[in-house]
Amino acid sequence: MKALILGRGAREHALTWKFSRSFRISGLFCAPGNAGTADLATNLPEISETDTEALISACRREAVDIVFVGGETALAAGVVDALHAAGISAVGATAAAAQLEASKAVSKDFMKRHGVATAEAVVFTDTEPFEQYINKLRHPVVIKKSGLAAGKGVLETEDKDEMIAFGRETLRDDQLLVEERLTGYEISVFALTDGTSYTLLPPCADYKKAGEGNTGPNTGGMGAICPVPWVKPETMEQVRQRVLEPTIAGLELDGLRFTGVLYLGLMITDEGPKLLEYNVRFGDPEAQVLLPLIKSDFGSLCEAMVEGKLAEFPLELSKKTALGVVLASPGYPEAYRRNIVVDELPTNDRKELVVFHAATKTEGERVMTDGGRCFTVVGIGHELLEARGTAYSAVKNVKFDGAWWRPDIGGMIFGQ
Ligand code: AMP
Ligand code: GLY
C-alpha cells in the first residue's frame, strides 16, 4: 500500500514516521513535508495543502492508495471531498463535517441540538445586541470568534471595554460567541471513526501557553503528554457518555459522518467534562505523543478505517507514557526569526526518544528553521517522570541559535 500524508508540521512528521514503521507500506509520500519527513518519505514540496488538483494528479501518478490529511485548512477546503470524487481513499473529515471546527457558531448549535455537555453560549452577528448583552453581564465569560483563528480567537478578560473592542473588530467579518467561563483542567481526547463506529484513545494534555506555569500568550502548543495521570477512568467514561456518544449520534442524524479523527477539547469541571470545541483532526503537539503509543500496525489501522471495518480492528496501545517538548524560534509566538541553521540534532534511533520536525527545511546538507515551532522532542517511559527525563535530556542536544522551550511540560495544568 502507498500512502501520502498531507501537511508540513510535526504532527505530519509523526504520521509519516508511524506509516514508515508499518509492514503494509510499500511507498510513502509527504506533501509538502519538512526536513524530517524527507528522511522517511518522498517529499512533494511543490504541493501546498489546499492544491487539490496537484494532489490528485500526484496520487494518480504515484498510484497512492490512501491519503491522510493532517490539518484543518485542507479539511475545511474540501480536500477529502475532492479525493473521494476522484476515487482516492482518504482519512479526514469532509468539508461539511469540518464546519464543526471551522465555525464555532455551527458547532455550538450542533452541541445544543444533540445534547452534548458544553458551556452555555450566545451567538451574535450584530454589534448593538452584543454591546447591550455585555453591559448587562453579571457572570464570567470568554468571548470567541466563530471562524478559524489559529489559537488567537478567544478573549479571556474581565474588562468590558476590552470585550466590546474585540467584539466590534470581530463582528466586521465574523460571528461572535459569548460563552460561560468554565473552571477546571483541560484535556484533549481523540476518537478514530470510520463513520459508524469509533475508538476512543487515551487522553492527552496540551500546554498551550508560552510561559512556565501556564503564563503568557497562547501558542499552537508548547508540549503535550499522553496519557494524563490525573484523569480518572470514570472521567473518560463520562466523556464517552456525555460528549462522544451524543456527538456520533448527531453526526449520523445530520448526515455528517466521516472517516477520520474527532478531537474533543474538554474542560473537566466539578460537574464533569464539558466540551469547549471540536476539531476534526489530530492535535499538534498531541499527535506527537499519542502516535508513538499505538502498537498496532498503522497502515492496517488506516486501511480498516477507510474500509469501514474499525469495529473489527484489534487496536493495541502501549501502557507507557509519552511526553513531548516543543522547541520554538526566538520571538515565537510574536514575530520570530526564520532561516536559522540547526547545528545539531539527536539521531532518531532510540526506542525511547523521537525527534519530530515541524517548521524545518533542508538547504543542501543543512537543516534550517522555517517557522515558529521547529521541533517536538518526545520521550517515552514507563511513567511520566521517566518520559520527562528522557525528553528534557535530549532537548539540549537540539541546537539552533535562540531555541527556547517550556521547562515544565508534564506539570498539572488548571483552568481559570
Ligand atoms: P477554543 O478555541 O474554544 O479551544 O479555546 C481556546 C482556549 O480558550 C481553550 O483551550 C481554553 O483555555 C480557553 N477557553 C475556551 N472556552 C472557554 C470557556 N468556556 N471557559 C474557560 N476557558 C475557555
Ligand atoms: N494542540 C491544539 C491543536 O492542535 O489545535
Image (cartoon, rainbow, N blue to C red):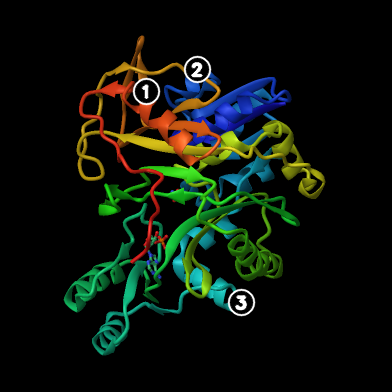
Q: Measured along the vertical axis of the image, is residue 109 above or below residue 28?
A: below
**Is the residue indicated by label 1 positioned so its CB lies within 8 Å of ligand 2?**
no
Question: Which of the two labelled residues, at mark 3 and mark 2, occupies the earlier sequence position?
Answer: 2
Residue 49 seen in render: no
Amino acid type shown at disc 2: Asp
Amino acid type shown at disc 1: Lys
Q: Residue at x 30, y 53 (%)?
A: 214
Q: Which mark is residue 115?
A: 3
Left or right of residue 330, residue 99 in this image: right
Residue 38 seen in render: yes
Question: Which of the two labelled residues, at mark 1 and mark 2, occupies the earlier sequence position?
Answer: 2
The residue to which callout 1 is attached is 361
For disc 3, the neighbor class at 10 Å (few under 14, some 14 to 19, many from 20) is some
In which quadrant will I find the C terminus? bottom left
Amino acid type shown at disc 3: Gly
Q: Is label 2 in a helix, a strand or a loop?
A: helix
Badge nearest the viewer, 1 or 3: 3
Q: Marks 3/2: CA distance?
A: 46 Å
Picture coordinates of residue 305, whole percent (x, y):
73, 44
Q: Which mark is residue 39?
A: 2
Q: Measured along the vertical axis of the image, is residue 210 above or below residue 289?
A: below
Picture coordinates of residue 226, whole percent (x, y):
52, 44
Q: Is label 3 in a helix, a strand or a loop?
A: loop
Picture coordinates of residue 390, whole percent (x, y):
43, 29
Q: Residue at x 32, y 83 (%)?
A: 139
Left or right of residue 271, residue 195 in this image: right
Q: Marks 1/2: CA distance?
A: 12 Å
Question: Which of the two labelled residues, at mark 1 and mark 3, occupies the earlier sequence position?
Answer: 3
For disc 2, the neighbor class at 10 Å (few under 14, some 14 to 19, many from 20) is few
Q: Nearer the viewer, residue 286 or 383?
A: 383
